[in-house]
Every structure is written in structure tokens, then in C-alpha cells.
Image (spheres, rainbow, N blue to C red):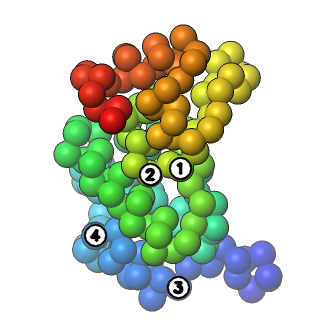
Amino acid sequence: MTKIQKQFFCTHERKLELLRLEGLKTWVLNQFSAQLSAGQLQRVVIAISLSTQTKLLLLDEPTTALDNACKRIILKLLEYLQEKLDILLLFVTHDIRSIKNICKNIAIIKNGRIIEEGSTQVLLNKSGYSYTQHLLESTFENKNLRK
């Protein structure tokens, strides 16, 4: 096995560890993706991403198409994995509500350019840009959720 192959090799023990961290049972290893729920499938995908012991996990709309209960599970799981595995998350989303507790800093991008960046809590509470305000108002059903 070459050095590159070893880097991407995942032992059976590592698979079991990741499944345990994800809150999944070993039976998912024998299932086709169509046999899993959306939440289970998302957790399996996250486990696969972590199998190479990465230090950076890119998440592109990780809660899209999930119901609110599954969204909460995935977001809590990501918070837990971030702390437990000491990984950096790069979280791309239109659902600003989902990043409220998981991201320390955010960058607002419009037309391919960063128009605003800074502390998540500061921008959620006091953004000076109308585009950011529009995103916040379209995301939060109740403006009091920002606090």
C-alpha cells in the first residue's frame, strides 16, 4: 500500500468508532443509501468525510432537505464532533439560523464577494448591511431569535 493509499484507508475499527460518534449502529454498513433516512444518510456522509482523520470539514448546506428534528440532530452532532475531534468546520449555508451556535465567525457573500464578516453574534445582532438584514429577516421567523 502506498503512502497516499494509507492516508485514505479506513480500518474497520475506525469505521466502528465513527459510527459510534455519529450515534449510528453497525447495521448501516450493510445498507444501501436508499434504505436510510435522510438524517441517517447525512450522518453516514459525515462519518465517511471524517474517516481520513481530516482537520477541516467542508459542509455545503448540510441541513438542506432535513426536517427540523433532523436539522437539530445534525447541528448538535457537528458541534460535538468539532469539540471531540478538534476539527475546523467551513460551513456554507443560506440557513443562518443553523450557524448561530456552531460558528464563531461568519462571512456574508453576495455575488461572489465578501460584503461583511466578523463575529457571528455581532453580525446576527447588529449588521449594518441591508443584504445581511434581508438574510436574517428571511431566515428568522421571529426577530427575537437573534438574541
For marks 4 and 3, give the CA distance: 17 Å
Please rate how many residues cluster around mark 2, counting C-alpha atoms within 10 Å: few if below 14, some from 14 to 19, many from 20: some
For marks 2 and 1, give the CA distance: 7 Å
Q: Would you say the residues marked 4 and 2 are in contact, meaning their CB atoms lie under 8 Å apart?
A: no
For marks 4 and 1, give the CA distance: 28 Å
Label ID, residue 102: 2
Q: Which residue is drawn at the image coordinates 45% and 88% (left, top)?
A: 13
Q: Amino acid at mark 4?
A: Leu
Q: Amino acid at mark 2?
A: Ile
Q: Would you say the residues marked 4 and 3 are in contact, meaning their CB atoms lie under 8 Å apart?
A: no
Picture quadrant where residue 145 is located: top left
The answer to whether any part of residue 3 appears in the image is yes
Label ID, residue 104: 1
The answer to whether any part of residue 44 appears in the image is no
Q: Provide the secondary structure element on which disc 4 rests.
A: loop
For marks 3 and 2, give the CA distance: 29 Å
Q: Amino acid at mark 1?
A: Lys
Please rate how many residues cluster around mark 4, counting C-alpha atoms within 10 Å: few if below 14, some from 14 to 19, many from 20: some
Picture quadrant where residue 87 is located: bottom right
Label ID, residue 11: 3
Residue 126 coordinates in the image, percent (x, y): 49, 26
Which mark lies nearer to you, 3 or 2?
2
Q: Which residue is drawn at the image coordinates 53% and 50% (left, top)?
A: 104
